[in-house]
Image (tube, rainbow, N blue to C red):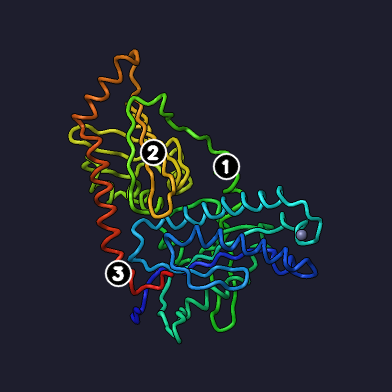
Amino acid sequence: MNNETQHGYLVLADISGYTSYLAGTELTHARDILTELLELIVKHFKPLLNIVKLEGDAVFAHVPKSKISRDETLLEMMESTYLAFRDRVEGIRRRTTCQCNACKAIPTLDLKFIAHFGEYVLQNISGITELVGSDVNLVHRLLKNHVAEATGWKAYVLFTEAGLAQMNVKMENLHVQVESFEHLGEVKTFNMNLHERYKELKEAQRVFISPEEADWASTRIITAPPYVVWDWMNDIQKRLLWETLHDVQPLLRPGGRMGTGAQNHCAHGKNVFVETIVDWHPFKTFTIDTGSALMSRSLEDHGEKTLMNIYMKMKLQMPRWLTRPLVGLMLRIGKVDQQFDTLVRLIEEEAKKSGKVNDDQNRS
Ligand SMILES: [Zn+2]
């Protein structure tokens, strides 16, 4: 049990429309649907966040700053949770033939997130861990806000000023809203429309090198969840630990964040090049165009482990029978395969270290 003051993210995922949905409906059907949706949120949160508790139609979680190196990963995690939530709601709607009010109202269910960064302490009462602090109160008070009223949005991420500043992204198209609470005063919030984001991510073209197209392919099994592997492949400081790069500098961030079209300036010895992200589906796939090659990576979630596939295709104007042996030789010289061995080793070393730290955490 950690009694010290923690600095970290406080996150609430709240199923919107649920209160009106429950009123006057077939209760057991409503309960089953809620259970399924809450389980889905918990499953997506759990690898990265510590679940504090379920609060009716909401999931409350936290993560100390020391556990997150790349803050943007948390934002991507909320978005991938939302994608899965929306797809599941649609799936439930499609498989349900029941005509009761609960089942008919399934499409009205949606999801919002409150994301704040602040201080809190863990308090253990008879084996039940609670989070205590005024930041904990604030994040709960923010569940009642005026975002939907002002924007008409049904699903959104609400960042507090502290939450957004810590995330260190410069997102455009955020709706700024000031909420006013008794005893807490005025609170400025920054809100992102999740319906719009869902559409963007769903419509984003998948650019992925297939095994048939690849000049080189490799596979690794890593004892860590996909978000951890994703983090290691995108956190610049971490990349420098395993890739044979001497420098990586962010060059372009469309919409103020990582995603399709983002560019990094990379240095590899005397070789300087710009890499462009051409495919970006957090925790699942991404493809980089280095100018001379395309490299795709996919992550498959296998519970405690991640299966990573790597495919590379050189942009050479040569017949295939010539490119494959040539690429093999170039990659051996560039020690590309060994880089991924280093990546696996570093991730597993980190997992072992944090495993010890996590023993006293509220990670159920
Ligand atoms: Zn029903």
Residue at (50, 67) in percent of width and height: 11
The mark found on residue 297 in the picture is 2
Label pair 3/2, CB-CB below 8 angstroms: no
Residue at (78, 55) in percent of width and height: 98
Q: SS at mark 2?
A: strand
- Please report whichever mark, 3 or 2, sits nearer to the chain's N-terminal start: 2
**Most foreground residue, 240 or 352:** 352
Does mark 3 have its CB less than 8 Å from ligand 1?
A: no
Residue at (22, 36) in percent of width and height: 268
Task: Give coordinates of residue 226: x percent, y percent.
Answer: 40, 50
Q: SS at mark 1?
A: helix
Please say if 232 is above or below 215: below
Does mark 1 have its CB less than 8 Å from ligand 1?
A: no
| Residue at numbered disc 1 | 202
C-alpha gap between disc 1 and disc 2: 19 Å
- Please report whichever mark, 1 or 2, sits nearer to the chain's N-terminal start: 1
The mark found on residue 357 in the picture is 3
Q: Quadrant of residue 341?
A: top left
Task: Give coordinates of residue 176: x percent, y percent.
Answer: 57, 61
Disc 3 residue type?
A: Val
Which part of the image, by quadrant, shows the C terminus? bottom left
The mark found on residue 160 in the picture is none
**Most foreground residue, 347 or 159:** 347
Numbered disc in front, either 1 or 2? 2
Task: Give coordinates of residue 283: x percent, y percent.
Answer: 44, 48
Disc 2 residue type?
A: Arg
